[in-house]
Image (cartoon, rainbow, N blue to C red):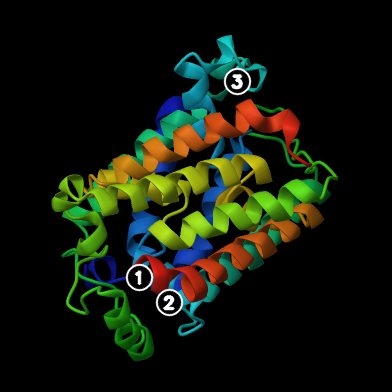
Amino acid sequence: MKKLILLVVGIVFGIIMYKSEAASWFRIYEMFRFESFHMYGIIGTALFFGIIFTQLVKKFKVKSFDGEPIVIPNKKATRYNYILGGTIFGLGWALVGACPGPIFVMIGAGFLPMLIVLAGAILGTYLYGVLKDKLPH
Amino acid sequence: MDFLFNPWPWYVSGFLIALTLLVLLLLGKRFGMSSNLRTLCAICGAGKKTPFFNFDWKSESWNLIVVVGAIMGGYIGAHFLSDGSMPEISEATKVSLEQLHISEQNTYLPKELFSIESFSDYKTILVLLIGGLLIGFGTRYAGGCTSGHAISGLSNLQLPSLIAVIGFFIGGLIMVHVLFPLIF
């Protein structure tokens, strides 16, 4: 049952990504040129409600559907990895116009060259795993 | 049905993304897409040589179900809920496309990068592969992507996520304003 719900969440998420146009290279390009409010509106609205939902869940110690306490882990208090990793990701995001979610959504939409991006992303993740201990964090 | 078929306004999309985050929290899960890439590495056996991938990937397999859903959602969005047309971006952005040799008359994604002909063009393959490498390496180094940091992390008021998102923009701005004229 839970698997089915997760599948539906994924389907709805994929449709949202497609229909919001957040999965389109053109919208990402436009965002980094500051020539439209569209993407900032999406991220801003998502954050506005995201903050409310997350803080309510924490404040009222809401339990999950299973009755377990909901634990939202804090991010590790390092610095360099966030700014360096973030910048590297930003370069890729702008180049191919897709972050990890939309990569999958666009493969489903039939843009098969996105499979090359996915292969690169898996390889990049692997490279990070190999080099992890040599990088500043 | 028009409201479904037309592109969705930003406030509807933004709210629904937050709702996705909430439902995943209530299911006892997290909203984060890039960790699936690590899981895929682990499934491919990367854990034998590299400790970073030596974890119980089955405990993360729930997120792959979300990924399968996202792929299906992309199919539904493209085939049943739209005509695949190019987003109505601003005039200024449209005009600037010419310098990149990307057509103003286009599809949902630029055909110059994502049509089937890309598979037979070495330069395009290289661009897509390098883009993917940067995404995979960068997200894992930063510990999250747009969903994990910009939405989940910032919603949880995490300073590291703010630093990561500033990084996303530094990288994106360098790419679009400095490197695009050299690449395209």
To the question of a shared chain for discs 1 and 3, the answer is no
Residue B53, numbered label: 3
Q: Is residue A134 shown left or right of residue B180? A: right
Asked if residue B169 is positioned above or below residue A124 in the image, the reply reads below
Which corner quadrant holds the C terminus of chain B?
bottom left
Q: Read off the residue under disc 1.
A: A26
Asked if residue A86 is positioned above or below residue A124 in the image, the reply reads below
Can you name the residue that lies furthest to the top here?
B48
Measured Cα–Cα span from mark 3 to mark 2: 36 Å
Return the chain for callout 2.
Answer: A
Measured Cα–Cα span from mark 1 to mark 3: 34 Å
To the question of a shared chain for discs 3 and 2, the answer is no
Residue closer to the observer: A1 or B41: B41
Residue closer to the observer: B97 or A100: B97
Asked if residue B57 is positioned above or below residue A8 in the image, the reply reads above
Residue closer to the observer: B84 or A90: A90
Residue A10: x percent and y percent?
A: 41, 41
Q: Read off the residue under disc 2.
A: A30
